[in-house]
Amino acid sequence: MKVFVTGASGHIGSLVTAELIAAGHRVVGLARSDAGAARIASLGAEPLVGTIDQPGPLAEAAGAADGVVHLAFKHDFSDFMAAIQTDRTVIDAIADALDGSGKPFHVASGTMMLAAVQAGRIGTEDMVGDPESSPNPRAATESVVLGLAQRGIASAALRFSPSVHGPTDLHGFIPTLIAKARENGFAGYVGDGENRWPAVHNLDTAHLIRLGLEQAPAGVALHAVGDEGIPFRQIAEAIGRGAGVPTRSLSPEEAAERIGFIGAFMGVDNPTSSVATQELLGWAPTHPGLIADLDEGFYFNR
Ligand SMILES: NC(=O)c1ccc[n+]([C@@H]2O[C@H](COP(=O)([O-])OP(=O)(O)OC[C@H]3O[C@@H](n4cnc5c(N)ncnc54)[C@H](OP(=O)(O)O)[C@@H]3O)[C@@H](O)[C@H]2O)c1
């Protein structure tokens, strides 16, 4: 299969690219810089120079491919709605190029989309986030992606755990929480810290994305989840151990003030299952969990 991957130079995309190539697929990877193009070429893929601000060439590349994985995203949390709008424009352009083709179009999403609908329950693949009440405005994007199945596109929402962890995780929530712990002199959690976050290793995620492209039916959510739900206090304790700072309980308001953007998500209870994804794809997470990865030390020694 010839696969067009946006975000191919990133934390998740670079491992997906390597995984696809190792399995015998060809990859065209979007690169917005010379460094990105070099990284993509070093993985054995063909770089396509461009940006998500100019969707025309991306739609063309999607039309010429047998499948698309869309992972690129502007992680500019100072203007999150603009990032979401750019993402929607790219998705709409690629969808127009794939209309009626039956080709897979798999798009980054997150388990947090379910947080408002799952209260007291473990999130499952059949649940759909409510764009009105979800704490994450990307829920609206996900519902557009799932709806593309009605247009003859084998779309799937890749619901990533809020932490897709591993050595290439340089800008995700965990590195940000570590930086905040160092800055504040403590690792925070909200209330009693019993709220749960799912997590998944990056290598397990890459494997899941490859299997999904090869096998998933149209209009499904795939859960990239290894740890179903780690009490957030345990994550804070592991960050505290690694960063050499104490842990501290925060009110939701203090969390927003002291931790910033992630403070709003820190107290969310988001236990999530991947049982249906595992059964659908014959996938099983095999790499270390988040706490083991944090205790490994690499997050703190760079
Ligand atoms: N990592 C997680 O824990 C996690 C959790 C939930 C959801 N997600 C979602 O999963 C997707 C991939 O995440 P990631 O962790 O791999 O992110 P990442 O490491 O920050 O990679 C982002 C990718 O997007 C590219 N990109 C950013 N702005 C671009 C632009 N204007 N034009 C073209 N390309 C651009 C980056 O290129 P450069 O290499 O040039 O910067 C990079 O390849 C994102 O949608 C993210 O929000 C991630």
Image (tube, rainbow, N blue to C red):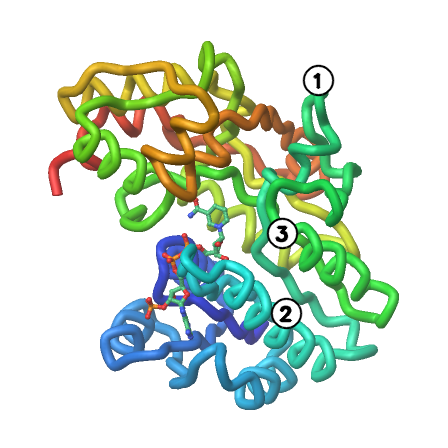
Q: Quadrant of residue 140?
A: bottom right
Q: Does mark 2's beta carbon lie closer than 8 Å to ligand 1?
A: no
Q: Earlier in the sequence, mark 3 or mark 2?
A: 2
- The correct choice, above or below, for 94 with respect to 289 in the image is below
Cα distance, mark 3 to mark 1? Answer: 21 Å
Residue 29, label in figure:
none
Amino acid identity at mark 3: Pro
Amino acid identity at mark 2: Arg
Q: Residue furthest top?
A: 192
Q: Earlier in the sequence, mark 3 or mark 1?
A: 1
Amino acid identity at mark 1: Gly
Q: Does mark 1's beta carbon lie closer than 8 Å to ligand 1?
A: no
Q: Quadrant of residue 239?
A: top left
Of residues 132 and 301, which is closer to you in this image? Answer: 132
Of residues 188 and 172, which is closer to you in this image? Answer: 188
SS at mark 3 in the image: loop
* Residue displayed at 33% across by 22% down: 188
For mark 3, does the 10 Å Cα neighbourhood hold few (<14), some (14 to 19), or many (20 or more) residues?
Answer: some
For mark 2, does the 10 Å Cα neighbourhood hold few (<14), some (14 to 19), or many (20 or more) residues?
Answer: some
- The correct choice, above or below, for 37 with respect to 113 in the image is below
Residue 280 vs residue 230: left or right?
A: right
The C terminus lies in which quarter of the figure?
Answer: top left
* Residue displayed at 62% across by 41% down: 135
- Point out residue 48 in the picture as x, y percentages from the top left corner: 42, 84
Q: Which residue is mark 1?
A: 120
Q: Quadrant of ligand 1?
A: bottom left
The N terminus lies in which quarter of the figure?
Answer: bottom right
Q: Which residue is mark 2?
A: 88
